[in-house]
Amino acid sequence: KQEVTQIPAALSVPEGENLVLNCSFTDSAIYNLQWFRQDPGKGLTSLLLIQSSQREQTSGRLNASLDKSSGRSTLYIAASQPGDSATYLCASQGNDYKLSFGAGTTVTVRA
Amino acid sequence: DTGVSQNPRHKITKRGQNVTFRCDPISEHNRLYWYRQTLGQGPEFLTYFQNEAQLEKSRLLSDRFSAERPKGSFSTLEIQRTEQGDSAMYLCASSSRIDPPEEGYTFGSGTRLTVV
């Protein structure tokens, strides 16, 4: 059974600082890894999807890397803004099509 | 098509009552998933449809839960004789038929259930 862990559970930074969010998974036989953002009481918004054959994906200020051999993915958010405050979830997809989620990292960016 | 739609957004019910939630996936997606999320946790898989066929159910889904996807379009999730432990956010997602889905999962805004 895939176990996904996200560290740290919470993070508070001043505006402008770069964010580094970590995700680790126990089973490297994944199809892809997806990062989501969740605002309080809301659904999940997809940020980046990394296929198993890829090493990284970029979108604007966001960059996600994937190292299957070590079972790790990292989400980098450059020049953080108060609007980046949210919970960030990573999820791996196995060959059974199901997503296995971490518990998330709650980010607060202080103005 | 504006994405995955879920109704209602919020539902408050008394213990013992039945509730039903609806999910309308992205029209060209043939796979539909239900997940449940409790406070401070990541979503957990409940069940999955490919077209109208329910292919898998989690052990989290007791016999009080039933899900359908008639005609392979929208889906409903019904909870009978609700219990306080059923209080959670119920999330629906869909993905395309491509293996693996190049665009990943698209989630709806969820239905928050509170059982009092």
Image (tube, grey):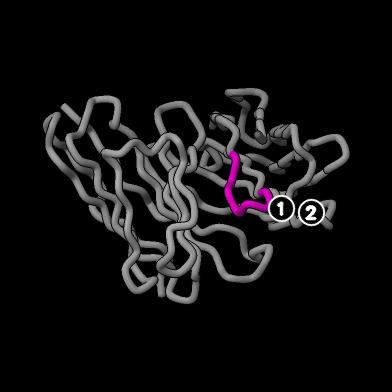
Most foreground residue, A41 or A66: A66
Determine which quarter of the picture holds residue A24: top right
Span shown in magenta = A94-100
Q: Which residue is mark 2?
A: A52
Q: How many other residues sit within 10 Å of disc 1, few (<14), some (14-19) or many (≥20)?
A: many
**Residue drawn 71% across the image and 41% down it:** A75
In the image, A48: left or right of A40?
Answer: right
Q: Amino acid at mark 1?
A: Asn
Determine which quarter of the picture holds residue A16: top right
**Residue drawn 28% across the image and 31% down it:** B87
Q: Amino acid at mark 2?
A: Ser
Q: Which residue is mark 1?
A: A32
Q: Position of residue A7 (x, y in %)?
A: 67, 25
Q: Is residue A96 above or below residue A105?
A: below
Give the mark nearest the N terminus, 1 or 2: 1
Q: Is residue A57 above or below residue B98?
A: above
Q: How many other residues sit within 10 Å of disc 2, few (<14), some (14-19) or many (≥20)?
A: some
Question: Quarter holding the C terminus of chain A?
Answer: top right
Q: Is residue B44 above or below residue A96?
A: above
Question: SS class of the residue under badge 1?
Answer: strand
Determine which quarter of the picture holds residue A18: top right
Kindly identify which chain the residue marked by label 2 belongs to.
A
In the image, B48: left or right of B77?
Answer: right
Check whether the beta carbons of the residues at disc 1 and disc 2 lie within 8 A of each other: yes
Q: Position of residue B73 (x, y in %)?
A: 36, 71
Most foreground residue, A35 or A97: A97
**Residue drawn 65% across the image and 49% down it:** A93
